[in-house]
Structures are given as structure tokens and as C-alpha cells.
């Protein structure tokens, strides 16, 4: 026991002696642990919050829309095996006119009972009271939409309901699990000012659309263990004769689909990036501890000579390593949980959760600590194994100096150009290639991590330019409540300020290929579209196929389709024909899942005339107010979306999310980069203290001695910068591939400015470390350093 206590006292003294290096190592491992905890705890917390919210407010399992069915059909639906409960609704999109807001907005009217709460997809009131029976003008408005327009209970706004303008009064503000991600159909980003759910008393809404005793939307709750697909197939057969457009499971419900895609991307970052950070931190920890323990070669031999066993000596140094790693792990866990909670709160702002639950799973924390401990123990074992293998008498002698040999760079013309100190630098690197390579690799990893932490904004800028400037060249999209005749196109052309109009036909379908299927809409385009073009990831325009489909690459992958394959198209509108269509092209694009077709060919397959679903408009900005007023009061118009608003929403939403995450990664990557360079410099000083002191004694100045030590560090750093940039580009490409989702595919772009900033940041860390080491070197105790250890 007394011997163990003696070694423990030595352990405390060793930790105090290398406190600066120990702290730097602890911060390196802490940064890796923090990133690991931040991402995985945020992902777990968001999933827990979502599951709790869905359960508490009874989010549905299956959703279906149709033209109109009598309420008596509900008996058939409830008889479907596996259905626990079903709720019929009336759901309609209308144009709304909000006071003080010039642009037209779209409201999704959803019926709810006035004499009780909805059985499924209930609302969470944030302000006000529930609607009252006998008050058809009362509505509950989505909280985020109301907040965007500063609407409160008691305020009013107008809506064009079935061609008639009506004043609606706000009774309450609310959230709903059906609109966690509040996005308008056909768009990719939420726009709280221009789209909002509105809940209205069922009898009032049904009466306005002649649906008393009927419904056009239904939500189902399934029994535990029920077959989701069998229920959907049975439901589709029942609703087909009533204009059903295809039931979908919860995972494809619009809000949940977007939300799960976001979580999929977060999961990609949460499993890939933290592993990279923690892996790099573990590698650097291993290298640093190996070099630190190797410096105690003589001490290890002395301890063995005093009678301590190899096991006791090994355990002593493992405890030193574990002590540093433990400190780093606790720092990382504390910072990770604090930042993880902040990240969950940030996502809650975008996803509109009325509740927020944070959870850092014990398994996540234990795994992060285990990786840290494993790296620390590994670093100690590698160094101690070599030291304890020597006999005490041999190990107590300093390691023999390297054999003299001129390096290749000293030959030829360089021999005359290199000064004596410069040749010392070159020879040191030549004699210790492994040490130099490890230092170079560590510094390069610092650059790589900084690139991984900052390149996301490059991808967003490219994606924004691609989508909103290259592919989309219109100003606004106008959609009709029902498919309209070609005359509607001429009416749009005659509206004030309209410069150009381009029609489109959108048809809801179910694509089938083997056992795979997906509900989606075919977008019929003119033969040579100008306002909304098909552009692939190489920024090349793709022609509209004359008689086939062009699919997004992600959709083709989901359905296992290639050009030349044939796909079954089950039309979910009108006469609902079933077609067999060829896949003419697969387009590798960046946003959404799209199916394109020649509009004339699509109408021929549908056996209809010049029907259109809407149009893209280019308009004179000086006349936009007049155009907005006319569109607001056009009964056939169901919605108007502005490209500038979509672009601003995308940039603000994605930019803010990525910006905050970028800040977190940059801070931790900077800590790791500085820790790497500082540790390398301090360890080099410890390894060469006797050599440098000797140079001082024989007449070298402080500047020359500093030049020898720091010059070597400078060469390693400068060689590491391009390597780190190259590794950063490769790592960014690999990371981007792990982030692909059905909503976004980010381009693998790392700009020169991002690479330059990362390289300069590491170079600045090297300069700062050099200044600290230079100060230590200037105060080097020459007598102590020159003592011979016997």
C-alpha cells in the first residue's frame, strides 16, 4: 500500500509538472467528446420530443384526401381490420387577406368539432379559448402564422371561401402535430407569413362547401400490430369511387416527411461528424501521451530498479493518461450537454413544438467516455511497453543519439544555401521521420476539422443560387383551386404588371415499380420551359422528354428505376387511369423529389383538353401591389407563392441552423487545432531541452536556438496545411453523401476562401503556440537541463 501511495504522489507531481500540456490534451479530447454529445443528445431529444408530442395530441397513422364522400362511408372505414379510430374532416386551401400585409397568403382551413376536441390531430392552445358552437366566424389560427402577423385573439382577417369573401375572427392561437413543420404543399421551406393552418367549426366549413353530411379528408388511428399497407390498400379501394387521391402513412404526411428528412440529415451529421472529431482527438491524445511518457524513460527504469513490477509501472502511467482523459471527458460532457440543450431549443423554434424534452442518453455519455479512455490507455501502453522492456541499467542511460548522416536536402546547391541552424532543422526532421510525420498529421487534422466545421455555408450558397437563380426564373407561382381551362392562362396574362406566364399541369399519381411505390405529383411542363427549367447537378439544362418521364435521382433510387425502364402510373385524379410509361431520363438535382413530363403528353394520357393547374409568372416589381390585390380577389386562385419569399425563408432557416452549428464546430475544431500545435511544440521543447541548452552554452544566441526549435515546427506546419486542405475536401465530400435526404442533397463544395480561412487559423494557432514556447525557451534553466542523469 505504501508503494502504491508513493507512485500516486509521483503521479500528482507529474500531472502538475505537465499541467499546461495536460490541459491542452484534456481540451482536445473534451472538444471531441462535446461534439459527440451535442449531436447525439440533440438527435435523441428531438425524437423523444416528437414522439411525446405525437402521442399526447393523438397524431394520426394514416391520412387520405378525396373529392367528397358521405359520412356513411365512415362505417366501412371503421370496419377495416386494424383500424382503431377514424375521423372525417373538411380541409380546404383558401386565399386570405391579412390586414397590413399586401401580398396574398394561403390558409389551410381544417374542420374541428365545436362541441368537443378532435379525436385525432388535436390542437394545443397557446393563447385564447376553444371555438364555441353557434359562432361560425370564429377560428383558431396557427401560432407561428399569427405571430408572424402579430395577430391576437379578437383580431379579424378576410378569407375567400368558395368564391365569397368572409371575415373571420380569431378565437385562439394553437399548435398541432399535423403542422410541426409548417410548409405549403409543393414548397420546400416554411413561410410563416404566407401560409398558415386555420381551424374552423366543422358545420360552418362544411356548409360553405356544400359538404353537410360529407367529408373530403380522413385521418386514421391504427391498432397495435396492424398492417399499415393492408389498411391503406383497403382504404384506397373504398375511397376510389369518391375521388380518393391515395392514402399515405404517417411517414409520408407532409409535415412529418419534411421533419423526418431534417432528422435524417441531423442523424447523418450526428453519427459521422462527431465520430470524425472524436477519432481525431483520440489519435492526437494517443500521440501526445506516447511522446510524453517516452520522455520518462529513465524514471521508469529507476522505479523498476526499486522493485516495482512491470504491471505496477504500467498501471501508474495508464492512470496518468486516464486522469487527463477523464478531465477531458467531463469537460466535453458538460459542454456537450449545455450546447445540446441549446441546439434542441433552436430546432424547437423551427419545428414549433409546444413541449421540449432534453435527453442525453447514458449510453451516449458512456460511449464517449469509453472512447476517450481507450485512446488514453492505448497511448500509455505503447510508450510504457517499450520502456519496461529494457533492463533498468540500460533504460536509466539516455537513449543513444541518432547516427550522424547528412540529409539528401543538404547535398548539391542547398549545401551552400543552408546556414548551420537551418541544417540542424533539416537533420532533425531527417533523423526523426516518424515523429515529424505524426506531428504533420496532427496539424493537418486540425485544418481538416476546421473545414468540416465551416464548409456547410458554401454548400448552402451554391444550393440557393442553383435553385432560385438557375432553375427557377419566375417571380411567383399561382395555383388554382381546381384544374382550369386554358382561358385562365390568358386571364393571368392580362393582369397588371404580368410580363410573362408559363403554365404547368400537376397530376397526383402513384408510381409503382415492382413492390416499390410512391405517391407524388407529375409536373407537366411546356416543351421548352423558360421560367422553371429542369437543371441537373452539373448545372446543365435537361430537355423535357417528349413522351416519357424525367425523375429526380433520389426518386429513381427509391423506386429502383433507370432510364429505359417502365413504371406503372396510377393516376389519382379524374377518371384515374392506370398507365404504363417509360422513364426517359434521371435528373440528379438537389431539392425535393420531382417527376417531369411534357404537359401535352400528360394531358393526352389524361384524355383532357388544355387543362392547367397553375402558372409561373414574371411580373413588374413596380406594379406588384395591384397584381397582389387582383390575385387576392380571384376566386379560382387557391394560393400564390413568391420566389423571393421562398429564397429568404430558405436562407434564413437553413442559414441560421447551419450558422449556429458551424459556430459550434468551429469553436471545437479551433480548440483541437490549437491543442495539437501547442502540444507538439511543448513536447518538442521537452525532448530537445538538453540539446538546446548545449547550443546556448557553446555560444548560440536565444534567437538562433529559438529558430532551430520553432523552424522545425514551422516546416511541419507549412507542409501540413495543404495536406489538411486536401483531407478536408475529401472528408467534406464523404460527409455530404451521408446527409442526403428526400428533401435536400447538398453539393460537395468547399470554396477557396473556406480552405484559406481554415489554413490561416491553424497557422495562427502555430504562431501563438510558438510565441508561448519561445517564452519558455528564453527562460530555460541551462544548468538543470545539462545535468547528466546517472
Image: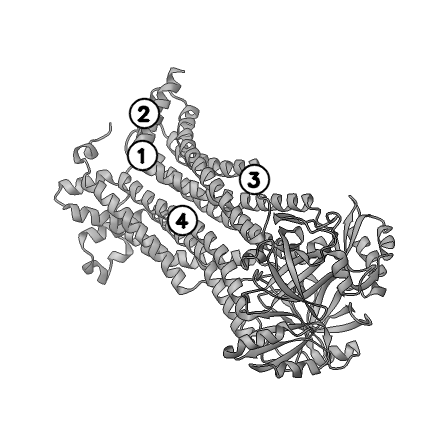
Is residue 292 visible in the rendered image? The answer is: yes
Q: Which mark is residue 302?
A: 2
Pointer 4 and pointer 3: residues touching (CB < 8 Å)? no
Q: Quadrant of the C terminus?
A: top left
Residue 472 appears left or right of 407: right
Q: The residue tagged with tag 1: helix, strand or loop?
A: loop
Chain-order first, disc 1 or disc 2: 1
- Residue designated by label 4: 667
- Residue designated by label 3: 359
What residue is drawn where x is 35% and y is 40%?
A: 24
Q: The residue tagged with tag 3: helix, strand or loop?
A: loop
What residue is drawn where x is 66% and y is 84%?
A: 490
Chain-order first, disc 4 or disc 1: 1
Residue 282: x %, y % from top left: 45, 42
Residue 310: x %, y % from top left: 41, 25
Q: Picture quarter containing residue 218?
A: bottom right
Chain-order first, disc 2 or disc 3: 2
Pointer 1 and pointer 2: residues touching (CB < 8 Å)? no
Residue furthest top in the image? 2
The CA distance from mark 1 to mark 2 is: 20 Å
Residue 22 appears left or right of 374: left
The CA distance from mark 3 to mark 1 is: 36 Å
Amino acid at each position: 500500500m505504501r508503494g502504491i501511495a508513493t507512485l500516486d504522489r509521483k503521479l500528482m507531481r507529474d500531472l502538475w509538472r505537465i499541467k499546461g500540456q495536460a490541459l491542452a490534451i484534456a481540451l482536445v479530447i473534451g472538444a471531441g467528446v462535446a461534439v459527440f454529445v451535442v449531436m447525439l443528445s440533440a438527435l435523441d431529444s428531438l425524437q423523444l420530443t416528437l414522439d411525446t408530442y405525437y402521442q399526447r395530441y393523438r397524431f394520426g397513422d394514416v391520412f387520405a384526401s378525396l373529392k367528397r364522400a358521405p359520412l356513411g362511408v365512415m362505417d366501412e372505414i371503421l370496419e377495416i381490420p386494424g383500424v382503431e379510430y377514424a375521423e372525417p374532416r373538411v380541409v380546404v386551401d383558401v386565399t386570405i387577406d391579412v390586414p397590413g400585409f399586401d401580398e396574398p397568403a394561403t390558409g389551410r382551413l381544417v374542420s374541428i368539432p365545436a362541441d368537443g376536441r378532435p379525436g385525432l390531430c388535436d390542437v394545443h392552445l397557446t393563447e385564447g379559448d376553444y371555438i364555441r358552437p353557434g359562432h361560425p366566424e370564429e377560428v383558431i389560427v396557427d401560432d407561428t402564422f399569427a405571430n408572424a402577423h402579430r395577430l391576437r385573439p379578437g383580431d379579424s382577417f378576410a378569407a375567400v371561401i368558395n368564391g365569397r369573401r368572409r371575415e373571420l375572427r380569431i378565437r385562439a392561437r394553437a399548435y398541432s402535430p399535423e403542422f410541426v413543420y409548417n410548409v405549403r404543399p409543393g414548397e420546400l421551406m416554411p413561410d410563416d407569413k404566407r401560409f398558415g393552418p386555420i381551424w374552423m367549426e366543422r358545420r360552418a366549413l362544411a356548409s360553405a362547401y356544400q359538404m353537410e353530411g360529407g367529408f373530403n379528408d380522413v385521418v386514421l388511428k391504427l391498432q397495435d400490430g396492424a398492417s399499415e399497407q393492408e389498411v391503406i390498400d383497403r382504404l384506397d379501394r373504398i375511397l376510389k369511387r369518391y375521388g380518393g387521391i391515395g392514402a399515405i402513412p404517417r411517414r409520408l404526411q407532409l409535415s412529418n416527411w419534411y421533419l423526418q428528412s431534417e432528422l435524417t440529415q441531423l442523424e447523418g451529421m450526428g453519427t459521422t461528424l462527431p465520430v470524425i472529431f472524436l477519432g481525431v482527438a483520440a489519435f492526437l491524445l494517443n500521440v501526445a501521451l506516447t511522446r510524453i511518457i517516452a520522455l520518462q524513460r529513465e524514471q521508469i527504469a529507476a522505479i523498476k530498479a526499486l522493485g516495482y513490477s512491470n504491471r505496477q509501472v504500467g498501471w501508474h502511467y495508464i492512470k496518468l493518461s486516464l486522469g487527463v482523459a477523464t478531465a477531458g471527458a467531463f469537460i466535453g460532457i458538460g459542454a456537450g450537454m449545455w450546447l445540446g440543450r441549446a441546439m434542441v431549443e433552436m430546432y424547437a423554434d423551427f419545428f414549433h413544438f409546444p413541449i421540449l424534452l432534453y435527453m442525453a442518453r447514458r449510453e451516449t455519455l458512456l460511449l464517449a467516455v469509453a472512447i476517450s479512455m481507450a485512446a488514453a490507455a492505448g497511448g500509455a501502453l505503447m510508450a510504457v511497453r517499450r520502456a519496461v522492456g529494457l533492463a533498468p541499467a540500460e533504460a536509466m542511460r539516455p537513449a543513444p543519439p541518432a547516427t550522424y548522416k547528412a540529409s539528401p536536402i543538404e547535398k548539391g546547391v542547398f549545401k551552400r544555401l543552408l546556414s548551420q541552424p537551418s541544417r540542424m532543422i533539416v537533420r532533425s526532421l531527417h533523423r526523426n521521420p516518424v515523429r515529424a510525420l505524426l506531428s504533420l498529421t496532427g496539424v493537418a487534422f486540425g485544418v481538416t476539422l476546421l473545414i468540416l466545421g465551416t464548409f456547410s455555408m458554401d454548400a448552402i450558397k451554391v444550393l440557393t443560387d442553383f435553385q432560385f437563380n438557375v432553375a427557377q426564373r419566375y417571380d411567383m407561382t399561382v395555383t388554382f383551386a381546381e384544374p382550369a381551362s386554358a382561358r385562365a392562362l390568358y386571364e393571368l396574362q392580362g393582369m397588371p404588371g404580368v410580363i410573362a406566364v408559363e403554365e404547368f399541369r400537376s397530376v397526383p399519381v402513384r408510381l409503382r415499380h415492382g413492390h416499390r411505390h410512391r405517391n407524388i405529383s407529375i409536373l407537366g411542363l411546356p416543351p421548352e420551359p423558360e421560367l422553371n427549367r429542369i437543371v441537373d447537378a452539373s448545372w446543365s439544362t435537361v430537355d423535357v422528354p417528349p413522351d416519357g418521364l424525367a425523375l429526380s435521382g433520389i426518386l429513381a433510387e427509391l423506386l429502383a428505376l433507370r432510364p429505359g425502364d417502365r413504371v406503372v402510373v396510377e393516376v389519382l385524379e379524374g377518371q384515374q387511369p392506370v398507365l404504363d410509361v417509360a422513364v426517359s431520363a434521371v435528373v440528379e438535382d438537389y431539392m425535393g423529389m420531382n417527376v417531369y413530363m411534357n404537359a401535352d403528353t400528360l394531358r393526352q394520357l389524361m384524355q383532357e383538353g388544355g387543362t392547367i393547374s397553375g402558372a409561373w409568372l414574371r411580373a413588374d416589381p413596380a406594379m406588384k401591389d395591384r397584381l397582389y390585390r387582383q390575385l387576392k380577389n380571384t376566386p379560382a386562385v387557391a394560393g400564390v407563392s413568391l420566389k423571393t419569399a421562398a429564397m429568404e425563408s430558405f436562407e434564413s432557416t437553413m442559414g441560421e441552423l447551419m450558422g449556429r452549428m458551424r459556430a459550434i464546430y468551429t469553436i471545437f475544431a479551433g480548440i483541437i487545432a490549437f491543442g495539437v500545435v501547442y502540444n507538439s511544440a511543448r513536447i518538442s521543447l521537452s525532448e530537445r531541452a538538453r540539446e538546446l541548452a548545449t547550443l546556448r552554452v557553446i555560444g548560440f544566441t536565444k534567437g538562433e536556438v529559438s529558430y532551430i526549435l520553432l523552424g522545425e515546427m514551422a516546416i511541419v506546419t507549412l507542409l501540413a496545411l495543404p495536406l489538411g486542405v486536401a483531407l478536408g475536401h475529401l472528408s467534406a465530400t464523404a460527409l455530404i453523401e451521408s446527409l442526403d435526404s428526400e428533401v435536400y442533397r447538398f453539393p460537395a463544395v468547399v470554396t477557396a476562401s473556406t480552405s484559406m480561412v481554415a489554413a490561416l487559423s491553424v497557422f495562427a494557432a502555430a504562431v501563438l503556440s510558438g510565441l508561448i514556447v519561445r517564452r519558455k525557451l528564453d527562460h530555460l534553466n541551462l544548468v538543470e537541463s545539462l545535468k547528466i542523469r546517472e
